[in-house]
Amino acid sequence: MLRRYLKYGLAGGLGLGTINTWVKLHNENYDINSLVVVRTGRSMITACQIGLLYKTKLYAKNLDKTTDEYKQLRSEVHQMAANKLLQLCRSNKGIFVKVGQHIGAMDYILPSEYVQTLRILHSDAPINPINMIYKIIKEDLKVEATDIFDEFVAEPLGAASLAQVHKAKLKDGTEVAVKVQHSFVRNNIDVDIQCMEFMVKTMSWVFPDFQMDWLVKMTKKNIYNELDFKHEASNAEKLAMLFKDYKWLKIPKVYWDYTTERVLVMEYVDGGLVNNLNYIKEHNIDPYDLSKKLGDLYSHMIFVHGFVHGDPHSGNIVVQKKPNDKEVTIYLLDHGLYGVLTDEFRFDYSQFWLSIMHRDFNKMKIYAKKLGINEDLYFLFAAMVTGRPWDTIKKGIDRTKPGETEKEQFQLHVPNLINDVSHCLETMDPQTLIVLKTNDLVRSLEYMLGTHERMCGLTVMTKCCLQTVNTGNIRNSKSTLDRMCVRLRNFYTMVTYYFYTILLDVRFKFLL
């Protein structure tokens, strides 16, 4: 592995590639962080520094892992390592910011020191100067930006790991949002992935509990699609078609005449981000109704359609309610990352969720195994999926409201189970990874809106699970009589569900 990095980072970086890069640096104000040798060297140094932190400050002490002294020291080392990782993400940008944002969203899986530190990347992504934005538009659309836009606001509406978005106005007066890819991303992608692999292998060697190969695999699988904005535009139109009956859901229109792999022009959306609590209050938006709609949307994505928006953080969800509107409108942005789930996966995952709801531990083991989880760790997988402690799951997640103390308890125990968590993430069906990410992000939105105690999405999630299982049972029936029996059982199940939702709603209103 080291030999490969020397080849790409030093031999290539200090050869003709570096000479060409220095020419760009002087002629085009090229960013020095785009140098292969700089990015590779910085990544290798950071990996070694983090490894030494754990080796010298934690493992060399030979402390009893059950003592408070060890736990306190472990937390301090986690924090120091997380700070170094944050610094690397900010310096290398691009895919490093993307991965850092992913880590910052995994509240229920990774140590809180990493999560809290890297979460800042959701609102602190790099920004390209406006002249670079115009340059990319000209390269891709073969015309000057002024030939397309009457107005183009230099200050971006927002910046993400791979791109930034500007407000503009077309020649016909239409207001649009223009998403332009960061100039440094494409040229560095292959080397950056190799850097990530090196870091993960190094940290896994010095810190055996740290197994993050799954994160590299998922990034490698998805990143090239995310870099193609035409692919993103197609995803947006597909989702709009799947949910065309959801009158409160809007997907911004794509202007294909001005869309390329690096430039995406969409309908401009006015409103407030879903985490803008002042906007929600000022426009009389019911946070419980908002949470219920989001739960409905993502439950149908996961369990019914198998087409899952993989990045539902607050910056990608805009809410709007005008004075005469009866209900809130939700705009879903950024359609670069989607998970496509097979019928078999959705059936097994739905069965696993229903076994949790019914507290059927035997079925939990069966369907956890089908999803790639060691049956001895089914209890941990259930906790990862629900974001609830195992003690709560045993009592019934529909019987106990979640709270901040429960979340703190969960995160307190994560460091003690990190090896088992890593094992689950390494062996589970890859489709599960994007579902877990989506679950974590939706849960974080519920906590932010203050609606987590009502668990607004639980009833619709149960309904979607039942719908998927019922469809699967009919599909697997071998005769007409079998199908009739299945349909009768399905009818009984749905009637039972109807009364269950009424009871559950009353119960949580009473608990609150």
Image (tube, grey):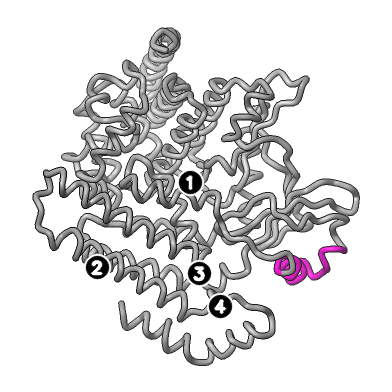
Q: Mark 1 or 4 closer to N-term?
A: 4
User: Which mark is drawn over residue 52?
Assistant: 2
Would you say 438 lies left or right of 34 here? left
Element type at mark 1: strand
Mark 1 or mark 3: which is in front?
3
Amino acid type, residue under disc 3 in the picture:
Ile
Element type at mark 3: helix
Residue at point 62% right, 37% down? 273
Mark 2 or mark 3: which is in front?
2
Q: Which residue is mark 3?
A: 189
Would you say 103 lies left or right of 425 here? right
Q: Residues within 10 Å of mark 3 (few under 14, many from 20)?
A: some
- Name the foreground residue: 210 vs 31: 31
Pointer 3 and pointer 4: residues touching (CB < 8 Å)?
A: no
Amino acid type, residue under disc 1 in the picture:
Val
Mark 1 or mark 4: which is in front?
4
Q: Which residue is mark 1?
A: 340
Can residue 251 be seen by looking at this rendering?
yes
Q: Mark 2 or 3 closer to N-term?
A: 2
User: Which mark is drawn over residue 273?
Assistant: none
Element type at mark 2: helix
Q: Which residue is mark 4?
A: 32
Q: Mark 3 or 4 closer to N-term?
A: 4
What's the magenta region? Answer: 132-146
Amino acid type, residue under disc 4 in the picture:
Ile
